[in-house]
Amino acid sequence: MTARISDSGGPFAPVIEAWGDAAEVILVCEHASNAFPQPWGDLGLTAEQQRAHIAWDPGALGLMRGLAQRLGATCLHATVSRLIYDCNRAPHMPGAMPAVSELHSVPGNAALAPAERAERMAAVYLPFHAALHRLIADSLARGKHPAIITIHSFTPVYFGQPRSVEFGVIHDADTRLAEAILAEAQAQTSLTSHLNAPYSAADDVTHTLRLQATPYGLLNAMLEIRNDLIATPGAEEAMAAQLAPVIAAALARCHAPAEAA
């Protein structure tokens, strides 16, 4: 059974869901929501734009929950659109509140005053990362060293260019878990899988891993699934069923040398 916990960080704080009592894995979905609540509203976007991948990662939340159930993991997800604040971007990064996303202008983010940027950061980013840090610190204090895995989806066509990759595994400084997941995905699935695709750390997409996992030496990776493969609840479940054994085997592979020593 899951315990759903709304963290006490204000109205835009993340939601935490626990799918086991002794989680060895924390799953994170920074782009889970396409909600545009007040006081920001729709940022001048059309309804179609609010549903598009520029606003969130379609399918990622359902996939994360499916993985969490199968892995007995704890998971945490954002509750507002990435265009209001992208929790996988540091406060000084232009992409934290982008004025343009791919080919789309975001009028509500144009010419934001420094005070407005600071207010959004305090309302969305700080509660998100404080809650995640608290989960990690609690696990460490209890003698556990959880792996931190962020779950994302990406569009099949970007700037007019089709993408053939179906499953991307991205790492920051620590390559251990990413390389193990890639090896298991290639061995266990027929997904077209690549390391550091369609993005890499050079694209500033590993902020959460760098901020939360690296300082503690925790295993970590970022997973990117092409969103046409998780476009329905059924497809999310099927992908979770396919990837959960991949992640479990990769974790076992990473822990094996320490256990054998």
Image (tube, rainbow, N blue to C red):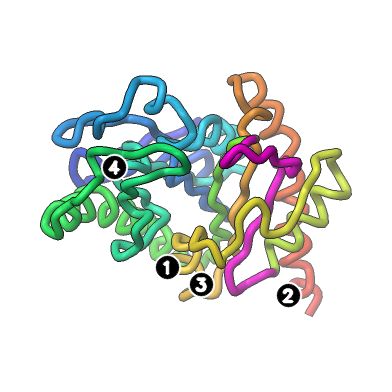
> Residue visible at 38% across and 34% down?
4
> Residue visible at 25% across and 38% down?
107
Verify whether residue 158 appears in magenta: yes
Mark closest to the chain's N terminus, 3 or 2? 3
> Residue visible at 52% across and 48% down?
27
Q: CA distance from mark 3 to mark 2?
A: 19 Å
Residue at mark 3: 214
Residue at mark 1: 211
Badges 3 and 2: C-beta atoms under 8 Å apart? no
Q: Position of residue 53 (x, y in %)?
A: 49, 34
Q: CA distance from mark 1 to mark 3?
A: 7 Å
Residue at mark 2: 258
Q: Amino acid at mark 4?
A: Ile
Number of the label disc, if any, that sits on residue 84: 4
Q: Nearer the viewer, mark 1 or mark 2?
A: 1
Residues rendered magenta in the picture: 157-175
Q: CA distance from mark 2 to mark 4?
A: 42 Å
Q: Nearer the viewer, mark 2 or mark 4?
A: 4
Mark closest to the chain's N terminus, 4 or 1? 4
Verify whether residue 191 appears in magenta: no
Crowd around label 4: few <14 · some 14–19 · many ≥20 (10 Å): many
